[in-house]
């Protein structure tokens, strides 16, 4: 058996518990040796709950005292650049929570810092690693519906996201960076790279600083067109939260992922219907299961890439392309015109 990767986790807040469960499930490959949070109580509680030997309230101290192969950064976006840069200074690889950073300048700085240090950097862009999306990718790769011509990727809910993450109500750039970045990343991986973006944003819920709904039209380099829509202000019964729903049309068929994660594929050989629900894990529960499981899938991909010495799908360098779509969407909404995304 090869030596396990020694890991540290920074940020023991709302979503970190899923990361902690994931690393524990990957215990044959990963040894979580330390956790860190500015709040000592949170750090100590996480260490106790997951049998992590040591906890810290200062990331620099942790990096100086521990022999780490990588850090998992599960903190809010403004802290990502200083923490990733700090890890790079210590020669430690990093997997960092999305959104990558508040600005493109910050994103580029992190990519360059890790490249200069010769350490991998991956963004925890986990929608593409959700089990239903992995199954959809297999169908598309098989050629069952032919060349893609049109798609709609929708993430719409009335779920009260602010209850668990109240700081989101104060974000001036909200849903496009919180959920839109995931859905735009899916558009890239399912339909292909993008040459033109046209977006409209809406602020529907009273008392929030940013947009809580966005509709984005993408023209892909292949000639395909996709509609990307996301909302935290859609009151539906039943509410599909936290499912991402798909409609994809090709030259020889179509694919629909409907509420309840039922996949219907009409192709050259006829129509098939199957459920893409996967069994819950001991630490997951509906309706969160699909999102929780994607954390484990993302972490497994990171470890596989570390061991193979290859660049992860959602490396920092690759994520610049997804981030460029977010920036283009905001600019399009501002000037009310189509925008070509930057590199």
Image: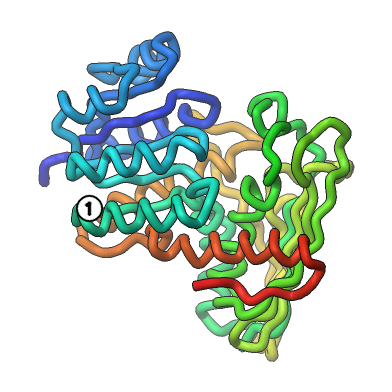
Q: Which residue is drawn at 21% across and 61% down?
A: 308
Q: Which residue is drawn at 29% across and 17% down?
A: 55
Q: Is residue 139 left or right of residue 168?
A: left
Q: Position of residue 5 (x, y in %)?
A: 19, 41
Q: What residue does disc 1 label?
A: 119
Q: Where is residue 216 in the image (x, y as percent from the top left)?
A: 75, 65
Q: Can residue 311 be seen in this view?
A: yes
Residue 273: quarter of image: bottom right
Q: In this view, does 333 lie to the left or right of 190?
A: right
Q: Is mark 1 on a helix, strand or loop?
A: loop
Q: How many labels does the image show?
A: 1
- Pick the front one: 199 or 30: 199
Q: Where is residue 275 in the image (x, y as percent from the top left)?
A: 65, 57
Q: How crowded is mark 1: few (under 14 residues within 10 Å), some or many (20 or more)?
A: many
Residue 194 in the image: above or below residue 215: below
Q: Is residue 145 left or right of residue 46?
A: right
Q: Position of residue 343 (x, y in %)?
A: 49, 73
Residue 92: quarter of image: top left
- Pick the front one: 127 or 209: 209
Q: Can residue 258 be seen in this view?
A: no
Q: Residue at x 68, y 83 (%)?
A: 224
Q: In which quarter of the image is the N terminus?
A: top left
Q: Is residue 243 left or right of residue 200?
A: left
């Amino acid at each position: 058996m090869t030596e396990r990767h020694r890991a540290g986790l920074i940020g023991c807040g709302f979503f970190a518990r899923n990361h902690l469960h994931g690393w524990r499930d990957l215990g044959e490959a990963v040894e979580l040796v330390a956790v860190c949070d500015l709040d000592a109580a949170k750090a100590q509680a996480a260490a106790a709950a997951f049998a992590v030997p040591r906890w810290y309230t200062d990331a620099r101290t942790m990096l100086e005292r521990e022999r780490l192969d990588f850090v998992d950064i599960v903190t809010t976006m403004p802290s990502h650049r200083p923490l990733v840069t700090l890890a790079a200074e210590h020669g430690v690889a990093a997997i960092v929570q999305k959104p990558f950073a508040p600005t493109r300048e910050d994103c580029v700085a992190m990519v360059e810092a890790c490249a200069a240090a010769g350490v991998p950097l991956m963004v925890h862009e986990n929608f593409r690693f959700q089990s239903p999306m992995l199954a959809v990718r297999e169908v598309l790769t098989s050629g069952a519906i032919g060349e893609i011509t049109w798609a709609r990727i929708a993430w719409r809910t009335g779920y009260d996201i602010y209850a668990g993450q109240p700081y989101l109500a104060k974000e001036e750039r909200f849903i496009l960076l919180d959920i839109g970045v995931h859905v735009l990343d899916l558009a890239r991986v399912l339909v292909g790279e993008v040459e033109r973006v046209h977006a409209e944003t809406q602020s529907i819920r009273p008392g929030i600083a940013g947009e809580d709904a966005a509709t984005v039209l993408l023209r892909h380099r292949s000639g395909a067109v996709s509609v990307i829509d996301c909302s935290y202000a859609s009151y539906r019964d039943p509410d599909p939260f936290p499912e991402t729903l798909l409609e994809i049309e090709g030259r020889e068929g179509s694919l629909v992922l409907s509420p309840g994660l039922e996949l219907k594929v009409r192709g050259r050989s006829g129509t098939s219907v199957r459920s893409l629900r996967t069994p819950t894990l001991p630490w997951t529960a509906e309706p969160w299961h699909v999102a929780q499981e994607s954390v484990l899938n993302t972490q497994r991909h990171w470890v596989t890439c570390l061991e193979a010495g290859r660049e992860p799908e959602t490396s920092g360098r690759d994520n610049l392309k997804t981030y460029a779509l977010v920036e283009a969407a905001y600019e399009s909404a501002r000037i009310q015109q189509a925008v070509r995304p930057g590199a």
